[in-house]
Image: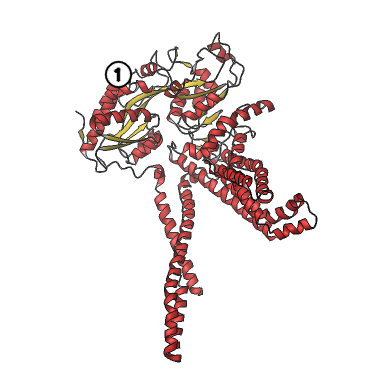
Amino acid sequence: MDTPIKNEKITLSEASLGVIDSGKKANTVSKKTLRRPFRQIRTEKFFKQTLVLMGLIMVILVFGILLTLIVESIPSIRALGLKYLWGKTWDPVQDIYGAFPFLLGTLLTSFLALIISVPFSIAVAIFLGEYFPKGWLSDFLKNTVELIAAVPSVIYGFWGLAVMVPIVRSFETKIGVDPIGVGIFTSSVILAIMIIPYAASLGRSVIQMVPSSLKEGAYALGATRWEVIRDVIIPYTKSGLFAGILLSLGRALGETMAVTMVIGNTSQLPKSIFAPGNTMASVIANEFTEADKAVYLSALIELGLVLFLVTTVINMIGKKVISRFTNE
Amino acid sequence: MKQSLFNIKNSLTALALLATLGLTSCGGGGTSSKTDSTASASGDDNTLIGAGSSFDNPLFSKMFSEYNKMNGLKVNYQSVGSGAGISQLTNKTVDFGASDAPMNAKQDSAASAPVLHIPVTAGAVAISYNLADVKDTLMLTPSVLADIFLGKITKWNDPKIAAVNKGVKLPGTGIVIAHRSDGSGTTNIFTTYLSKVSEEWNTKVGKGSSINWPVGLGGKGTEGVAGLVKQTPGAIGYIELAYAVQNNMAYAKVQNKAGNFIVPTIASVTAAANITIPPDSKVSLTNTDAADGYPISGFSWVLIYQEQKYNDRSADRASKLLKLLSWMIHDGQQYSGPLTYAPLSPAAVAVGDAILKSATFNGKPILQ
């Protein structure tokens, strides 16, 4: 922060030295040039301070949230210790809290959703980025995909309950598992739809940024469109595509409302992907209002802490992968 | 140049540390994080603030708006759930709390002063089911009900169910259990009942507003459970009677302690409450002794501090609160029926009156 002021002092003293050395003419010239820098530097300083403040607020918020989560989880950490992470029973009546079924539920739904959504989002990205970058059809498709992200999640929950659940139920009857309809599979499908736009939008913009000289070079060498996509576009954009996938995974991990409505909300360990389960976010949303014991409340907050850490770890791994892609 | 950079860095870290400390000290006030600090119990004396049970909310809205027409008193009721209502009362941010379960020993010790429980209404939990082909009303005994929710009876044509429902053609579909996924007073009433009638339930599962369900699917809120029941063939779930009636859902007759199969209705719930009620009114109506009472019912209580002088509250505010509550258990009861709440039994009103009279301001009784 002090740097510009010091620079300013230097120019001032230089100016005054100039006065002594080369007389009146130099003095007036330097005065004229100095008047603007003063104001400019003040603006610069103010702008920089604003930026620092804004950035600082973000940092404070994130660490404040983390610290609050840790502090509020202490009663539960004290009472339950590390067993909390792999305990399989969540029993508020007897004050036994094991987060493992929910941890598993969160990871299972999110990664399943990712597996379902990736082919769609990559396909949409290639279609919009390479095949039809312009025109009304592409605009229409682009806006439609982006609209998917704008729909409130509770609407997906409703739609899931009304449309997806009966479809999944008849599907389950056909393949011979318990025809419940709700469960991990249904919520993964809903989540997959919700997260498509994140990877698709980012993928589309990185694909459009592939230098045309590269593509033209490949075409000139006789490559087909598919070969250009496979050997030029995908390798060139893979870190961007992966970043988009990571973004959608982050969305899936934290999604609460839509999942709660279709996952079946049971604390039992899921036996298959068609069984009902629960996720950390939906347990918190469900049980927070009526958590009437201190340890119970604290265990729920610790669930938030675990979710926070899981998201952070996955993000860190993702960053590593992206940087490795870029270095190659 | 280098030094100035260091200055930036140092001041940044100092600021960050300070601010995080500030943030955590705000949030670190123990379990108070979910209470609404904007609600103050000592604001404008013509506005009372209450919080708690969402079950009571429709009835309270009606009662408070009617009372407002007569007396001009405003009541701001936050339907945040029984547990949250109790903790807001404990933190003295509201004039009264409302709960579907009496305060337990832990909650009592958390409150700084004795809390009075005034029964205001009674509700029932209906056992709703989805069996399209069964036209007659299903009958359930306590042991069958407990076995279903324990996951021991898994098919509708189980001999145990058939034995109670003679002549009813039961399908061979599997039973899908629907329960509340969110903490709820309804769950509390239902699990209290199951704990009373089934030793196995009592030791294995227990009672509470959130429990570890041995089997089944969770739906969020009454409408979530009702949705699961309506959608899933062979489903069974427990929901508030009012909701089941308003949505024309099928619900079972349940055998009570006297051996009679009782349909949940306003009358049978009021009848369930017509028993000897202890002076503190903290009684569970589940598994009632009354011969014509529906066994899965319970009171809902308004909670206030016995000593009304706290947090600079005025005598005027305390007397307004007590008058309101007295009106609620007498004239206010006329609004129960149309909203499918059970009016208080005469025994409950008598006990409620006695409790209200025991409330004091600065040691002196408020109601004469």
Task: Name the residue nearer the viewer: B105 or A233.
Answer: A233
Q: Is residue B242 left or right of residue A201?
A: left
User: Which amino acid type is shown beneath numbered disc 1?
Assistant: Pro
**In which quadrant of the rendered image does the C terminus of chain B lie?**
top left
Q: Is A232 placed above or below A119 here?
A: below
* Whether residue B240 can be seen here: yes
Rendering coords of residue B16 (x, y %): 45, 60
Find residue B112 and report its image quarter: top left
Rendering coords of residue A59 (x, y %): 49, 57
Q: Is residue A155 left or right of residue A133?
A: left
Rendering coords of residue B122 (x, y %): 37, 23
Most distant residue in the top direction: B167
* Circle 1 crowding by C-alpha within 10 Å: few under 14, some 14–19, many from 20: some
* Whether residue B341 can be seen here: no
Q: Is residue B338 left or right of residue A328?
A: left
Task: Name the residue nearer the viewer: A34 or B185.
Answer: A34
Q: Is residue A191 left or right of residue B297?
A: right
Chain name for mark 1: B
At mark 1, the secondary structure is: helix
Residue at horizontal 64 percent and vertical 40 percent from the top: A112
Q: How many marks?
A: 1
Tell me the residue that label 1 is attached to. B346
Task: Name the residue nearer the viewer: B165 or A264.
Answer: A264
